[in-house]
């Protein structure tokens, strides 16, 4: 991947992370409805679909680099668990502290009280949104729903790439059945990232003139804004609910209730990246601050929501700058968390490899 496009993907990750945080911070229970337009446009969920496309790119690259199923599984699991395990422990601690300070800051709709072992069990198996054993919210950490989706996509993709014959078909069928239709409904956007990487790495992306590249890179985000302005997401969601015979598609589909709109977002994101791949082909952007913040984006994503709840329970309602403290405090928790865990992934992997070699020699 060219340096220019690589830094652009990092910038998109940073922007998408901030959008997710802002979307949750905009809930009326945190900021009194002052920024509710962010909730009306549901930009946080839309940003997660952008993450899915980028994830497809990264995992398709990783599969080619890793070359074996064992190495692929090791790298994917260590990447997820190195952040997820401490994030679940932090969520449990923050939730218990916050409930002790102000139970009203933990409404039932946004908090499912699970014991620590159940949270760890559901989190470490990524089964919190699987069809089997059924969905569960890990305390206040609702955003962890997307990790359940991504882990399923990693497993399905890995089985498709590294297995063959009847075994591949059997494993794929089992994985799809366990994940369930809700998760599969959002997989097209993730697969668009896979498609983009294979076309990019093979040099077979469509050849574009500069004017066409600008049109895709600018036009795709503009189309997103236009669709939001004409209320297309709600129209599609209503059509989905009507087809299911329900007043609200979320009753059945949960986080996949806007799967048609989410697929459209995946298309917009992919078109934008095709345009940017051409525009940045010879660019050598090196925005170190973007790289640094992108290296903490995963941590911010998995910690900001329990941090928002704890800060909301802790801060007086009339404190000066309360909204800013909530936002900056939640991001600060993620940045500190990243220094302790996300940025230590290489050290963790080397330690695990060393312990494995020692065990074999013993």
Image: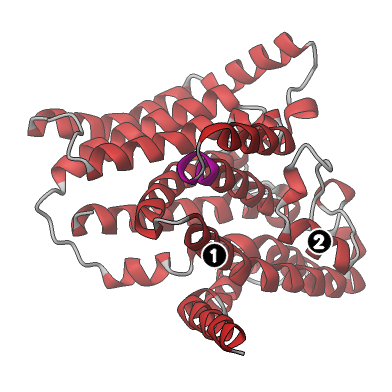
Q: Position of residue 51 (x, y in %)?
A: 48, 47
**Secondary element at image label 1:** helix
For residue 74, which numbered disc appears in the image? 1
Picture quadrant where residue 125 is located: bottom right
Kindly identify the residue that appears in the image at 69 percent across and 28 percent down: 181
Is residue 216 something one can see in this rendering? yes
User: What secondary structure prevails in the magenta region?
Assistant: helix
Quarter of the image that includes the C terminus = bottom right
Quarter of the image that includes the N terminus = bottom left
Q: Is residue 297 above or below residue 354?
A: above
Comparing 169 with 123, the one in front is: 169
Q: Position of residue 135 (x, y in %)?
A: 80, 43
Of circles 1 and 2, the one toward us is 1
Comparing 330 with 5, the one in front is: 5
User: Is residue 111 highlighted in magenta?
Assistant: no
Query: Counting other residues with Cα less than 10 Å from the Cα at mark 2, is it few (<14), some (14-19), or many (20 or more)?
Result: few
Q: Position of residue 350 (x, y in %)?
A: 48, 82
Q: Is residue 308 above or below residue 5?
A: below
Q: Position of residue 8 (x, y in %)?
A: 28, 53
Kindly identify the residue that appears in the image at 24 percent across and 52 percent down: 5
Kindly identify the residue that appears in the image at 50 percent across and 38 percent down: 164
Label located before the other in sequence (1 or 2): 1
Residue 13 appears left or right of 156: left
The Cα–Cα distance between marks 1 and 2, rounded to whole angstroms, is 19 Å
Residue for badge 2: 121
Comparing 91 with 132, the one in front is: 132
**Secondary element at image label 2:** helix
Picture quadrant where residue 272 is located: top left
Which segment is the magenta one?
157-162
Q: Is residue 134 above or below residue 111?
A: above
Query: Counting other residues with Cα less than 10 Å from the Cα at mark 1, is it few (<14), some (14-19), or many (20 or more)?
Result: some
Residue 286 appears left or right of 251: left
């Amino acid at each position: 991947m060219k340096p220019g496009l690589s830094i652009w993907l990092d910038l998109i990750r940073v922007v998408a992370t901030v959008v997710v945080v802002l979307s949750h911070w905009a809930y009326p229970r945190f900021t009194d409805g002052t920024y509710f337009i962010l909730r009306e446009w549901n930009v946080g969920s839309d940003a997660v679909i952008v993450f899915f496309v980028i994830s497809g790119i990264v995992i398709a690259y990783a599969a080619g680099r890793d070359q074996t199923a064992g190495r692929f599984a090791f790298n994917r699991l260590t990447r997820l668990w190195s952040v997820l395990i401490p994030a679940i422990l932090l969520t449990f601690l923050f939730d218990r502290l916050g409930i002790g300070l102000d139970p009203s800051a933990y409404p039932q709709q946004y908090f499912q009280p699970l014991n620590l072992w159940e949270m760890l069990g559901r989190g470490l198996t990524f089964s919190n949104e699987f069809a089997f054993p059924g969905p569960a919210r890990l305390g206040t950490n609702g955003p962890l729903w997307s990790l359940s989706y991504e882990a399923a996509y990693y497993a399905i993709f890995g089985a498709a790439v590294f297995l063959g014959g009847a075994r591949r078909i059997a494993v794929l069928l089992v994985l799809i059945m366990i994940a369930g239709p809700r998760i599969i409904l959002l997989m097209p956007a993730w697969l668009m990232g896979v498609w983009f990487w294979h076309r990019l790495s093979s040099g077979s992306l469509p050849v574009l003139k500069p004017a066409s590249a600008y049109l895709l890179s600018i036009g795709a985000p503009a189309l997103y804004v236009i669709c939001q302005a004409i209320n297309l997401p709600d129209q599609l969601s209503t059509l989905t609910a009507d087809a299911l015979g329900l007043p609200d598609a979320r009753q059945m589909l949960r986080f996949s209730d806007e799967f048609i709109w989410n697929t459209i977002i995946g298309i917009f994101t992919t078109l934008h990246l095709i345009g940017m791949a051409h525009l940045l082909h010879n660019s050598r952007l090196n925005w170190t601050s973007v790289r640094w913040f992108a290296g903490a984006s995963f941590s911010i994503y998995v910690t900001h929501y329990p941090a928002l709840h704890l800060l909301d329970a802790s801060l007086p309602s009339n404190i000066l700058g309360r909204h800013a403290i909530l936002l900056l405090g939640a991001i600060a928790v993620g940045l500190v968390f990243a220094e302790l865990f996300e940025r230590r992934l290489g050290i963790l992997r080397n330690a695990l490899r060393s312990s494995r070699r020692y065990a074999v020699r013993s």
